[in-house]
Image (cartoon, rainbow, N blue to C red):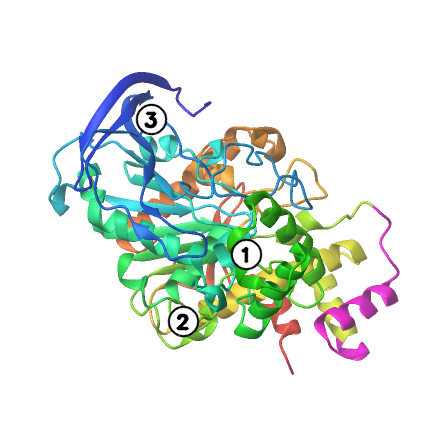
Amino acid sequence: MVLDGGFTLLGMVEVATPAGPLLGTTAQIASRRVHAYRGIPFATAARFGAPVRVTSWTETRNATEFGPAAPQPVGGPLDGLVPGAFRGVTREHGCLTLNIWTQATPSRPGARAAESRPVLVWFPGGAFTVGAASQPVYDGAQFCAEQDVVLVTCNYRLGALGFLDARSIGGVANCGLRDAIAALEWVRDNIAAFGGDPERVTVFGESAGGGIVLHLCASPSAIRLFRGAIAQSGATFNTLDEERAEWVRDALVAEIGSHDAEGVLLDVEVAELIRAQSASAMALLPTVGMMPFHPMIDGDVLPRAPLAALAAGSAAGVPLMIGTTTDEMRLFLDLSGPPPPRDKLCSRVARYVTVDASRAKQIVATYEAELGTNDANEVWAAVFTDVEMQLPAAALRDAHRSHGPTYSYLFGWPAADPRLGACHGIDIPFTFGNFVDGWSEFVGADDAAHRLGRALRDAWTAFATSGDPGWPVAPSTMRFDRNAAVVDDPLRARLASLAPQ
């Protein structure tokens, strides 16, 4: 692991927790000692069942290695778009683990809140189908050493195993979201032993991890488990209703080659389930969209989608930060070809935004003026990004603003490949300070990149400590760029041009 300030493994450390003793490792990072406890089981679960909390053990548990990740596909359309794809061990049963980094001296349970640190709990992304808390870019040592927070990273079940509506076969819906809640319950009950303050827990995550955060904000089962929330590039309108969730289940069963949902889903080998999951996702693209295995409204753990829930005050009093990168969807576009003629761009925008030709021309003209270019590829990339990511982010911020402090940011550091811009996922290594596994080359890391990462982590820590990241509430927006600065509602004209009339 290459970290700012160097890294020296010093040896082992043991901590007594309410759940039982844990054996971790101690490392020297710059002048600070960081204790790490990895692979801690927080729950177990049968296939499609609700997680059952792991509350205790008697023998000292080895917490020196990461636990296995949730089963997931290898390859596919998302693989290799950004560096550091997960390639480790997966296991259906035994994947529900979390990892903790802290500077606190190991002590007995029950540390006083006045001596405790703010806690940040990370949920990794990956379109709800891939990824793991053990990926090196999510290592919490640098963040912990620099900011003196308690940093937690969590696994949750993915794909069909995590987000299939299994109620018709005796299971539950939203297994992955329930896993996240179980992890937060474990943190609430045990984090004081690691020097963390259970009253100052902030949840954060990127992409699907940011989606987990927003669905936690909408869940009555979760909202008392954290004090603040940061959603990095996770705002969408993709929450499933019961009808679309049924389509997903039926497509998965059909791909496996059976009409007996209960028999096939409960008994099929996990490798075949993952294969069928990937195949059915492609078939569902025209009807359900890009992420068919996704949190759903189940009337239980998720009574409403995040937009409606936040508007109704589901997270009243909770400081909420929702932000994006400036060029989110360029990661998924091939912009290497010549730009199409303007009339074809206008026709594409009309179909995509579902407006008439006259309105589409107005939208294109607005974007040309805002971007300072008439390059059709540039305009299309911005429109695509705004519809998929910026409009949901703005709507969710607006829904929460009357119920609690609401903050906005834009992350603008561009990739080394100029065609990508500040694309989806590019903020991840800056968040943790880990430019590893090819991330340094991908972002063109230099001294300015390290300074920007430090500025972001300073803001995240301030938010976790006080609920205020250090800039005014939305629509004021912190733009994290080579020269970070607060700007006033920078996307107002673009988003207004897309609004229904």
Mark 1 vs mark 3, CA separation in Å = 35 Å
Q: Which residue is mark 2?
A: 310
Where residue 12 appears, as percent x and y from the top left, is 26, 20
Q: Which residue is mark 3?
A: 64
| Residue 146 within the segment the image draws in magenta | no
Tag 1 secondary structure: helix
Mark 2 vs mark 1, CA separation in Å = 34 Å
- Toward which corner of the image does residue 23 lie, by quadrant? top left
Quarter the C terminus occupies = bottom right
Identify residue type, mark 3. Thr
Mark 1 or mark 3, earlier in chain: 3
Q: Which mark is residue 265?
A: 1
Tag 3 secondary structure: loop
Q: Residue furthest bottom?
A: 501
Where residue 141 appears, as percent x and y from the top left, is 36, 30
Q: Is residue 148 left or right of residue 156?
A: left
Identify residue type, mark 2. Leu
- Marks 2/3 in contact by CB < 8 Å: the verdict is no
Q: Can residue 290 be seen in the rendering of this structure?
A: yes
Where residue 366 appears, as percent x and y from the top left, is 71, 68
Q: Which of the two discs, 2 and 1, sits closer to the camera?
A: 1
Q: Is residue 120 left or right of residue 285?
A: left
